[in-house]
Amino acid sequence: EIVLTQSPGTLSLSPGERATLSCRASESVSSSHLAWYQQKPGQTPRLLIYGASSRATGIPDRFSGSGSGTDFTLTISRLEPEDFAVYYCQQYGSSPSFGQGTKLEIK
Amino acid sequence: QVQLQQSGPGLVKPSQTLSLTCAISGDSMSSNSVAWNWIRQSPSRGLEWLGKTKYMSKWYNDYAVSVKSRITISPDTSKNQFSLQLNSVTPEDTAVYYCARDFRWSFDSWSQGTLVTVSS
């Protein structure tokens, strides 16, 4: 099973700042098979990015994804108050798996 | 717009069977471009994919190794829904359970989730 490790565990930033979240895979992942989700307390995960860099329907363009192989990044260009949440990466290899999450909190 | 509505008990006794159903609206279970999944989330295990069912001329199931000996996912095309059965549960199976659609190798529609507690 492919293990995804996200860093940092917690990221403290202020609204308007840029956020960079990392996801590292234990072995190479096809870019088509890498996705990012946002989850707020008490809510269901929401798909943000699929195929490593394609935004899901209705996702603002301040969210962008990049990377290939074993290293992937989610960038939020200018943080809005509603962006503070937990973010997960997910791979869809032979058996789908999720990272442990990065908590983005208000500084 | 796809909507997934799950139902089932929130409390299951140890050693018994956890059963949940996910009713689909806005899409067909037999669509061959998507798969229908069960995922759970707990503080100790995080988000954990359990398995899926997919129609590709016939029904095909795939399960996570961690639960493979205990899980069954069954489609019901007459009701456009699918179900999860997890046998021989223990307190470690306590989690929020979700059903989800996967399309383009990501989970784009999720149910509201059900907290299932395994306790006597």
Image (spheres, helix red, strand yellow):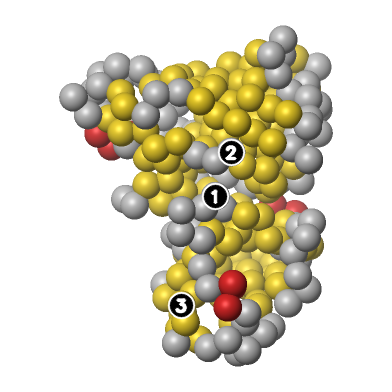
Q: Chain of mark 3?
A: A
Q: Residue at x 58, y 38 (%)?
A: B111
Q: CA distance from mark 1 to mark 2?
A: 8 Å
What amino acid is labelled 1 in the image? Thr
Image disc number at residue A105: 3
Callout 1: 10 Å neighbours few (<14), some, many (20+)?
some
Q: Gap between marks 3 and 1, in whole Å?
A: 18 Å
Q: Quadrant of residue B91?
A: top left
Query: Which residue, given by chain and number where applicable, does mark 1 sit on?
Result: A44
Callouts 1 and 2 on one subunit: no
**Chain that bears disc 1:** A
Q: Secondary structure at mark 3?
A: strand
Residue under numbered circle 2: B111
Image position of A65 (left or right of B74): right
The mark nearer the N terminus, 3 or 1, is: 1
Whether label 1 touches label 2, CB < 8 Å? yes
- Residue at (64%, 33%) from the top-left corner? B4
| Residue at the spot 52% in from the left edge and 52% down from the top edge | A43
